[in-house]
Image (tube, rainbow, N blue to C red):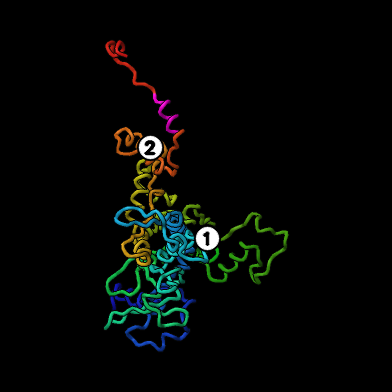
Amino acid sequence: MPSFWSRTAALLSTGAAVTEARSAEPNAADTMPDEVRPPSRSEVVGVTPDRAMTLSTVFRAVQIHTTAIAQLSVQIERGGRVVADTPALVQKPCLSMSRSRFLEETAAALYLHGNAYWRRIHLDGAVVELVPLDPRKVQPFTDPKTGRKTFTYDGRTDWTTLDIQHLKFLSVPGMTLGLGPIQAARFEIAGALDARDYGSGFFREGGVPSGVLKSDQDLNGDDARAYRRMWHGRDPETGEPLDPEDSRNDVRVLGKGLSYDYLGLKPSDVQFLESQQFSTTQIARLMGVPSSLFLASVQGGSQTYANVEQDWIGYVRFSLMNVLREMEEAFTEVTPRGQVARFNIDVLLRTDTKTRYEAHASALEAKWKTRDEVRDDEGLAPLTDAQRADIDTAVPAKPATTPQETENA
């Protein structure tokens, strides 16, 4: 039997991890050679990005990531210094959508499918527009002999790396497609889906009786059937409903040593709260979202302001930066040589107002920052001459602390 990683590589290399409704042809697999034939449906566990998004935890995780990325600006650096004029291609990559929507769709594709694709539109030899493509419709292929990479999209098979920019969530050697969290951990997500579906259909499809009639005597099948019909307000012989006046809420009369045991369940048991909490923690870890941002608590852990702030910093550096770096490299490839694209992540790392102002005051006192530099950090314009004069006149004189200093003053 093939190993998990070999089956995963085959699955991703053939594009079978996309939704079953988006496959190219219904019988396309029948014409494929055995070495590239997609795995059977039982091997993919029925987990697709669309189905995984029906879990509130997965949806929330993707929403957090895309919201964080969509609010970032992209700046161009040359020699480590920010270029004043950001190229139009970076300011608005796609003419048919805003920059934030462009970043949002790219991030969603990476987290859900493990891959994102930008169509490069050329004019006079230069890239003038980037159009995000549906990753479910793109199929990359790498020639094992030449290493040349081509793409199949929208009926065309001659797209190359000059036409399409391929972004990967996680690049694994030997795998043409990138590996995303849903594809890598589809068994865990399948377990969360099964627990959710079982809990929601517990009373409707679970087959668990609300109570049990017990007897200390032997009952044959006819007697058991008759007593069950009587309990439900039906004729013991025909099973027909009795007189409506005999309400099912009336007192029941039991004979032959019969007794009734109610099989009641606590609400927490019916909703599988412990299982849901475990799935939430598991998916938060899988998707790289801190529990504080996930609106969830981890058992045995305490949430303080300091912990939450450190969570946010760790989230940006070791979780979100994975996708941001891939997008930065993709932007860099379409910018003039010598320039580098960088996301401005200060908005995600900003501390509270009091802490930020104390840091500014310390920088001004140590004289390694000017007032205008501090104002620029806060998104404010440089001081005017009138403002500088007001600040200079408002600075109080240093108070005298000794009698000698008082006389000299």
Residue 403, image quadrant: top left
Image spot of residue 327 (x, y percent): 37, 63
Residue nearest the observer in this picture, 408 or 275? 408
Q: Which mark is residue 343?
A: none
Q: Secondary structure under badge 1?
A: strand
* Left or right placement of residue 214 versus residue 244 in this view: left
Tell me what residue is drawn at x 70 percent, y 65 percent: 242
Residue under numbered circle 1: 212
Gap in angstroms between the C-alphas marked 1 and 2: 79 Å
Magenta residue span: 387-395
Q: Amino acid at mark 1?
A: Val
Name the residue furthest front. 385
Residue nearest the observer in this picture, 403 or 40? 403
- Main SS of the magenta segment? helix
Q: Which mark is residue 371?
A: 2
Q: Secondary structure under badge 2?
A: helix
Q: In the rendered structure, does residue 144 fall within the stretch colored magenta?
A: no
Tell me what residue is drawn at x 65 percent, y 55 percent: 249
Task: Judge the density around disc 1: few (<14), some (14-19), many (≥20) Cα neighbours within 10 Å.
Answer: few
Image spot of residue 219 (x, y percent): 52, 67
